[in-house]
Amino acid sequence: MEVLHYYFLNEIDYKNLQEISTFKLRIALNIFKIIKREIRNEKELIKKLDDLSLKLFEQKISSKNELTKMIKNENFDTATMEDFLLRLAKEKLLIDNPSYLEE
Amino acid sequence: MDKLKKFTENLLNSEIKDFHQLSGGASAETYKLILTNKKKYILRRTPDSSESKLAISKKLEAKIQRIVKHNNVPVPEIFYEFDETSGFGSGYVMEFISGETIPRKILRDDIFKKIRTSITFRMGEILAKIHQSDISDLGELKEMSFDESLKELYKVYSSFKEPQPVFEYAFNFLAKKNLKNPNNVLVHGDYRLGNFIISENALNSVIDWELSHIGSPLEDLSWLCVKSWRFGKNRKRVAGLGNLDDLIKGYESNSSIKIDLNELDTWQIYGSLRWGVICMIQTFYHLNNDLNSLEKAAIGRRVSETEFDLMNMIKNKKF
């Protein structure tokens, strides 16, 4: 992974590529960064969300299917659910695009 | 690409010196071509394999561009059209308009510094003209109210069988809204930075009409405010360029429609949700092997951005 990352960053001559190739390579590099963050942070993320669901809902929500079902059935306190979903969205962004949180 | 170039040469009855694909475009492919006599054109087409779940046909897209041009909306002139019988999908060749479309350049480069101060008002003015287009000849276009749009979007989202709790919550939240704005204008459907050709002095053209339909004027106005289209310039609600007040002033200077700001907020929440579902659509084209595409595979991760925006709007009233 590190070697590939180095290759993307340092060994491709972006200036001499066609515009479309540069565009696609930048996307590929972004995907690569996401995978790296996912591998590094996935377990920690799951634990954080488990702890938060225990604190807010007094139960561990084991899957997004279960959470979706609660929402569909309107089986929630609005403020609690909104707190949880905002936190969930933030944690997902820390993997998918952390810079979006800074903007 | 060589076959497509040859096909285009036959269509134009001219020799092409330079033919290359431009980046961007969710469902359509766009090519810039320069003839040996130096004339420049743009070819836009939908290859058979990538028909979008939301996009209208290229034939209808061309027809709309002709209609709005008649109403003095700045759009490229359509010169030639072709359909699936060509073997190259369906599409058209249109006028090449010079200028910049890349949002990050428009938002940051010095040459656009002056236009950035006035363009929000202009975007409002032009949008009012689009919304006043004669729709009597556009019977093929779908008419979509807020409720219908929401139901349609939910149907698309559900079809993936990949539940997203934030989306589910947003659908639930929006379904309880009761909007009263009329739904009887031509809606561009993707009126945002990226679909404008801008030069240092003017907004030269509005492009990408593939999501057009009949609906509420608030849909276009609010879409321009969706945070994903601010490209990092988040303090300026309208496309990262200006404030809502300027957009509304520009719009109302050219229209008798009065804008309800609460309804606009609701439409903006819908807009973020819609963009999130479009990201899912693009990803599932790739996942279902309909089309193997790097761009489409990657865009799925932008769902998280829309989830964050949705909860900020719903919970924190941050637009």
Image (cartoon, rainbow, N blue to C red):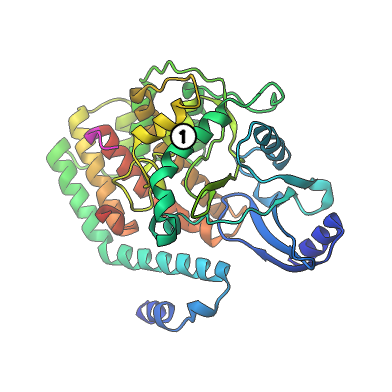
Q: Main secondary structure of the magenta part?
A: loop
Q: Is residue B318 magenta?
A: yes
Can residue B230 be seen here? The reply is yes
Question: Would you call the spot at circle 1 few (<14 residues within 10 Å), some (14-19), or many (20 or more)?
Answer: many
Can residue B109 be seen here? The reply is no
Can you say whether B73 is above or below B235 in the image? above
Q: Position of residue B281 (x, y in %)?
A: 52, 45
Q: Is residue B184 magenta?
A: no
> How many marks are shown on the rendered structure?
1
Quadrant, the C terminus of chain A: bottom left
What amino acid is found at the position of numbered circle 1 in the picture? Gly
Question: In the current view of this chain or complex, which residue is farthest to the bottom?
Answer: A11
Q: Nearer the viewer, residue B281 or A14?
A: A14
Q: Nearer the viewer, residue B246 or B307?
A: B246
Can you say whether A38 is above or below A91 in the image? below
Q: Nearer the viewer, residue B131 or B280?
A: B131
Q: Position of residue B301 (x, y in %)?
A: 40, 54
Residue at x 28%, y 38% (from the top left corner): B311
Quadrant, the N terminus of chain A: bottom left
- Residues in magenta? B315-319
Q: Quadrant of residue A16?
A: bottom right
Q: Quadrant of residue B263?
A: top left
Q: Chain of mark 1?
A: B
Per the image, label 1 sits on a secondary structure element best described as: helix
Residue at x 49%, y 77% (from the top left corner): A14
Q: Label 1, on which residue?
A: B124
Q: Position of residue B55 (x, y in %)?
A: 61, 40
Q: Nearer the viewer, residue B147 or B200?
A: B200
